[in-house]
Image (cartoon, rainbow, N blue to C red):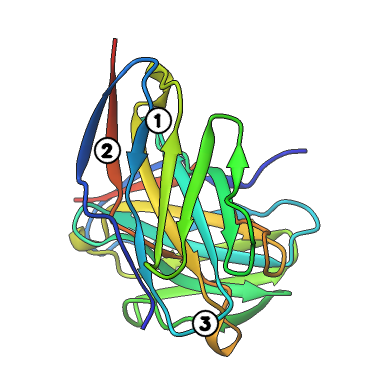
């Protein structure tokens, strides 16, 4: 079965500092994709970054980077130079197309609070 | 480009009433997904369509829930009869097949069943 685990219900960080949000996954499918989404208090789901299981390099998108450790089955999100607007829920998700399924499986999320 | 459009944004109804949620996917996307988000269960997939055909409805809670996609630009999720435990935020998302292609989420419909 496919599973995403986010062990940090809440995280705090000072503005301008970096923060790492943890994500571990479980799948037997050799081909999979990992995603991070941000959900601010307004409720929308915003795509941040993607990492494919065969990608050789860690994904980066602006201040977001994904620390992908395949052997450990972890895909941690690193946010550099935190801003107040980064305060939100962050969800890790996986797509592992066993049997052709395109569905995303989500973790429970981590609530990030950026302090001024 | 307009994103995924959902209506209504908020719905308050009484137990036993029929509720219909609507979604317009991004033009050109051939996948459409319905998710439900609750505090207890998090984000869970209800059903998804590919080229208007339902592919995986294993997440649909029970027969009270039904979803249709009559054409590439419109989908509905219907709950009949509604129950208080159906209260949640319902998201529609659309995308194209696989790989690095992400799913783009609509703003969600916040449903409250009294």
Q: Relative to A3, say whether A113 is above or below.
A: above
Residue count near mark 3 (Cα–Cα under 10 Å), binned few <14, some 14–19, many ≥20: some
Judging from the image, mark 3 belongs to the subunit labelled: B
A103 displayed left or right of A90: right
User: Which one is nearer the viewer's eye here, B95 or B51?
Assistant: B95
The residues tagged by marks 1 and 2 sit, at their Cα atoms, a distance apart of 14 Å
B113 displayed left or right of A63: left
First in sequence: mark 1 vs mark 2: 1
Residue B11 percent coordinates (x, y): 37, 45
Which disc is residue A42 wearing? 1
At 52% from the left and 36% from the top, the residue drawn is: A64
User: Which one is nearer the viewer's eye here, A45 or A66?
Assistant: A66
Secondary element under disc 2, as helix, strand or loop, is: strand
Judging from the image, mark 2 belongs to the subunit labelled: A
Residue count near mark 1 (Cα–Cα under 10 Å), binned few <14, some 14–19, many ≥20: few
Residue A74 percent coordinates (x, y): 39, 61
- Label 3: which residue? B56
Q: Is residue B20 visible?
A: no
| Tag 3 and tag 2, C-beta contact below 8 Å | no
Which disc is residue A111 wearing? 2
Secondary element under disc 1, as helix, strand or loop, is: loop
Which disc is residue A82 wearing? none
Of tags 3 and 2, the one toward the viewer is: 2
Q: Relative to A5, say whether A14 is above or below.
A: above
Quarter holding residue A111? top left
Residue count near mark 2 (Cα–Cα under 10 Å), binned few <14, some 14–19, many ≥20: some
User: Which one is nearer the viewer's eye here, A47 or B110?
Assistant: A47
The residues tagged by marks 3 and 2 sit, at their Cα atoms, a distance apart of 30 Å
Q: Is residue A45 visible?
A: yes
- Say which quadrant the N terminus of chain A sits in: bottom left
């Amino acid at each position: 079965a496919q599973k995403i685990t986010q062990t940090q219900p809440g995280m705090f960080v000072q503005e301008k500092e970096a923060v790492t949000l943890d994500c571990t996954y479980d799948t037997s499918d050799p081909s999979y994709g990992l995603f991070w989404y941000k959900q601010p208090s307004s409720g929308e789901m915003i795509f941040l970054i993607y990492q494919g299981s065969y990608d050789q390099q860690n994904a980066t998108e602006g201040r977001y980077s994904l620390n992908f450790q395949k052997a450990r089955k972890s895909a941690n999100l690193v946010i550099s130079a935190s801003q107040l607007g980064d305060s939100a829920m962050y969800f890790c998700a996986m797509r592992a197309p066993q049997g052709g399924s395109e569905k995303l499986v989500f973790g429970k999320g981590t609530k990030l609070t950026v302090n001024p | 480009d307009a994103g995924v459009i959902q209506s209504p944004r908020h719905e308050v109804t009484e137990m036993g009433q029929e509720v219909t949620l609507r979604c317009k996917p991004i033009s050109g996307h051939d996948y459409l997904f319905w998710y439900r988000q609750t505090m207890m269960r998090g984000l869970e997939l209800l059903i998804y369509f590919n080229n208007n055909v339902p592919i995986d409805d294993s997440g649909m809670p029970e027969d009270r829930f039904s979803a249709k996609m009559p054409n590439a630009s419109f989908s509905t999720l219907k709950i009949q009869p509604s129950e208080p435990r159906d209260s949640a935020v319902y998201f529609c998302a659309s995308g194209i097949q696989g790989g690095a292609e992400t799913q783009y989420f609509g703003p969600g419909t916040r449903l409250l069943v009294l």
